[in-house]
Image: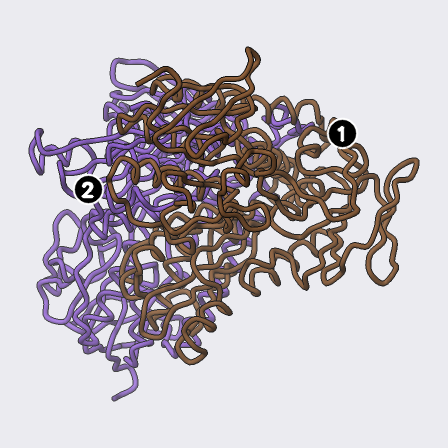
Chain colours: A purple, B brown
């Protein structure tokens, strides 16, 4: 094999790309990983990891602020953003070091620079030392995503910012308008409120986290209202004026909301422009790369994984697609990934977590008469009472059939989704889960109680 | 049916007793619940729930104390024990109210007073209004447990106390000797250290939480050492002198440890004396009531559940036994409970959680060559890094067979045991779990990574 010729050539070292590279190398394939930024991509450097560090700092601030109700005498004096950033950057750099070590340890060739698809299975990389041409028996497109804006809405990085800028802020803004009530918008709204800012969420759709079950949106909105986060749902954005000391945001109907900053959190677009995908004839739709359920593009031996593929833009979906493609290339014929079986978590205070179908989707899929739900209120769950959090566990099942959806709201419920995804993915019936013992007093016990109720024998619930 | 004659007569309204009563009533049986104290028993009033409230107050105190490393400027001024107790009592009374409502709502007859077995299926209750004789088609013994002491070690409730007294303390002691390094001892040691006390654990066995996998003990001990909790393992207690301002505890070898208090946490004994069990011929061993795997005593239609039955003394075991007996009486022929499938959690900082067999037990059961383990270090888990906790997920499996044990140490890992118990109880193989997607970045992802490693394809781990 010539220098520059690999079994697998991965374009992009984000979650999907590096997982594919690691698994392919593990399976004995020669792998090159092309990346213009840092191995780890959005998730590690400007996504999941740093935002969750901010959210944990927010939890610490809330704990201090509300310490009195637990009998602890503590005073919250303020947020030291330099300290928060140094904590956040410390977590990122430690994980980055680990990941870099793994990539190196598995003998993966990392090529730093911007890669373009210049032939069906050829990538040309602009490196610091000039252009380098690589070829692969297989090419995996994994170029990731960027924070989108709206037409006519200019991000200046100062007053009008995206999540990437928000992660670099050296201060807590006095007030913020968050444009977009999806996962990213809700997480930043939650952090800033905990840090002491005035926050207003503007969302065109009628509810927050609109991709979740309607009941989850309702309970999240109630919790945010209690936290005095202002919300304007069903309210499209119209325009923004940058003023001397902030922004004036006009929404449909003419209302103007003033704040120090506008965070644009309207979703993430695929990074696919100018990378030669179009020129090489990769089938695309509005910038996304189209694949079949085996992650194959229309070109032979060209695959795509992660945020450039239509569907959930989540790091763990990217991991799994990357692993899938590596195993498929190695001839292991893995099972296709069930997109609905991928758990979804919004790590706000409170958290929202789900897997499978929401009630509306289940009714649409199976018919109104063939779907049942049970909702277990966390008011009956001892550990949730101890944490002073409220929310629920809602189960959706096919009548006399398996659980097809689990939806939860409450602090820390994101950790319960591990069990919930097993229940969904193993197509468990209520009777399979109900007789099993959950530890008392935990929050996961609420999952057990919900299944007891679904099996017609609620223990700690009124039936 | 005569007044005072019931289908099911339950003696004791702790976890096992009330769960049995609730389920039996649900199944249409007439039920009497005899209790001299309050419905809810040890767990709700002087066990699981109040200690977990203390542990959460401790977490809040730690968060404030260590806030700086997260960039949060907060000062911990101290612990207001009156406030802690009012928070704790608030949680207990709210849950008690819910439970009382449930019991009432299901039409269960609650008889307040001390009940004695006065015939094979007859219970005489000393109530405030005099003796009352009840009979049952079935009698369920569920009289619970009490905090034990050692021979010659007198608990005075002032200087030498048990966990029940510890839950009522109106101050944070300056220093404590905790006699016993099991679950209860470790939880109180953890709380008091977080509250600012000097803590020394004295344990006769060679390690803390000796019922857990040896690796779990080692990591818990390391974490406690880092927290400056002093430990004297492998050190039997010899005697205690109550002094003017505290206690002087002498351990084997002659060392004397002085402290303000001695907490005796050497386990819980069955409450069975003087209740007529012996007289009626119930087969017993050292105070425990013997049963078969269907919770039957040697007497026809007399059952026993909860802490009086040899085995794990855990509220959720009691729940499940109680439900089991109710269903058995109703003729539903439920599956016997697999004791090893009951999850165990020590809610200290860090937490210890497990289900199934530990490595030594698995090797003993299946042979040294037929057992494999994988340990995934939480150092590779993003969310654990964010929480600044360390620990591991250790899997034990039969070679080419199912996972037979899951062992974890780290803050908040108690919530991961919900998924772990499904894996154990459903006899999952590594390959059943490995292809499923865990949400990133969560701690439950570490369970997914451990199964990937066990399946021979570690993602974020050096292999």
The quarter in which the N terminus of chain B is drawn is: top left
Secondary structure at badge 2 equals strand
In the picture, measured across the screen, residue A262 lies left or right of residue B359, that is left
The quarter in which the C terminus of chain B is drawn is: bottom left
Q: Mark 1 points at which residue?
A: B171
Please rate how many residues cluster around mark 1, counting C-alpha atoms within 10 Å: few if below 14, some from 14 to 19, many from 20: few
In the picture, measured across the screen, residue A1 lies left or right of residue B118, that is left
Q: Return the x and y of residue B344 as percentages of the image width and height.
A: 49, 50
Name the residue at the bottom extreme: A1
In the picture, measured across the screen, residue A333 lies left or right of residue B439, that is left
**Callout count:** 2
Residue A265 at least partly seen? no
Secondary structure at badge 1 equals loop
Q: Nearer the viewer, residue B443 or B413?
A: B413
Look at the numbered discs 2 and 1 and tell me whether their residues touch, using CB distance below 8 Å. no
The numbered dot on residue A404 is 2
Q: Nearer the viewer, residue A392 or A188?
A: A392
- At 61% from the left and 41% from the top, the residue drawn is B71
Marks 2 and 1 on same chain: no
Q: Which chain carries label 2?
A: A
Residue A412's place in the image compared with B356, above or below, is: above
Q: Which chain carries label 1?
A: B
């Amino acid at each position: 094999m010539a220098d520059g010729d690999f079994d697998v050539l991965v374009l992009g070292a984000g979650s999907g790309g590096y997982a594919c590279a690691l698994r392919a190398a593990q399976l004995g394939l020669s792998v090159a990983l092309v990346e213009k930024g840092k191995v780890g991509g959005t998730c590690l450097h400007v996504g999941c990891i740093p935002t969750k560090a901010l959210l944990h700092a927010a939890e610490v601030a809330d704990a201090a602020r509300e310490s009195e109700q637990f009998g602890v005498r503590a005073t919250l004096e303020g947020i030291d953003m330099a300290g928060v950033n140094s904590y956040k950057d410390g977590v990122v750099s430690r994980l980055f070091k680990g990941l870099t070590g793994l990539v190196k340890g598995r003998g993966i060739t990392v090529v730093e620079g911007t890669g373009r698809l210049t032939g069906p299975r050829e990538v040309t990389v602009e490196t610091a030392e000039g252009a380098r041409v690589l070829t692969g028996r297989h090419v995996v497109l994994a170029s990731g995503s960027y924070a989108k804006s709206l037409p006519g809405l200019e991000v200046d990085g100062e007053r009008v910012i995206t999540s990437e800028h928000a992660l670099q802020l050296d201060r807590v803004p006095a007030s913020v308008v968050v444009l977009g009530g999806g996962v990213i918008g809700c997480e930043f709204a939650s952090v800033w409120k905990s840090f002491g800012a005035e926050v207003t969420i503007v969302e065109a759709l009628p509810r927050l986290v609109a991709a979740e079950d309607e009941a989850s949106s309702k309970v999240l909105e109630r919790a945010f209202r209690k936290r005095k986060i202002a919300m304007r749902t069903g309210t499209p954005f119209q325009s923004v004026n940058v003023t001397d000391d902030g922004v004036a945001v006009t929404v449909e109907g003419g209302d103007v909301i003033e704040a120090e900053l506008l965070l644009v959190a309207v979703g993430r677009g695929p990074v696919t422009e100018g990378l030669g995908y179009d020129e090489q004839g990769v089938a695309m739709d509005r910038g996304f790369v189209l694949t079949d359920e085996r992650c194959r593009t229309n070109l032979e031996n060209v695959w795509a994984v992660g945020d450039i593929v239509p569907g959930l833009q989540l790091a763990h979906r990217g991991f799994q697609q990357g692993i899938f493609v590596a195993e498929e290339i190695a001839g292991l014929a893995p099972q296709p990934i069930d997109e609905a079986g991928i758990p979804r978590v919004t790590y706000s205070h409170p958290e929202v977590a789900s897997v499978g179908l929401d009630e509306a989707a289940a009714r649409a899929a199976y018919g109104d008469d063939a779907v049942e739900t049970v909702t277990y209120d966390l008011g009956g769950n001892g550990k949730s009472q101890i944490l002073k959090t409220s929310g629920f566990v809602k189960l959706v099942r096919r009548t006399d059939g398996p659980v097809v959806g689990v939806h939860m709201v409450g602090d820390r419920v994101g950790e319960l989704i591990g069990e919930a995804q097993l229940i969904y993915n193993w197509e468990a019936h209520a009777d399979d889960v109900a007789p099993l013992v959950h530890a008392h007093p935990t929050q996961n016990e609420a999952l057990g109680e919900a299944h007891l109720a679904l099996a017609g024998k609620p223990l700690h619930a009124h039936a």
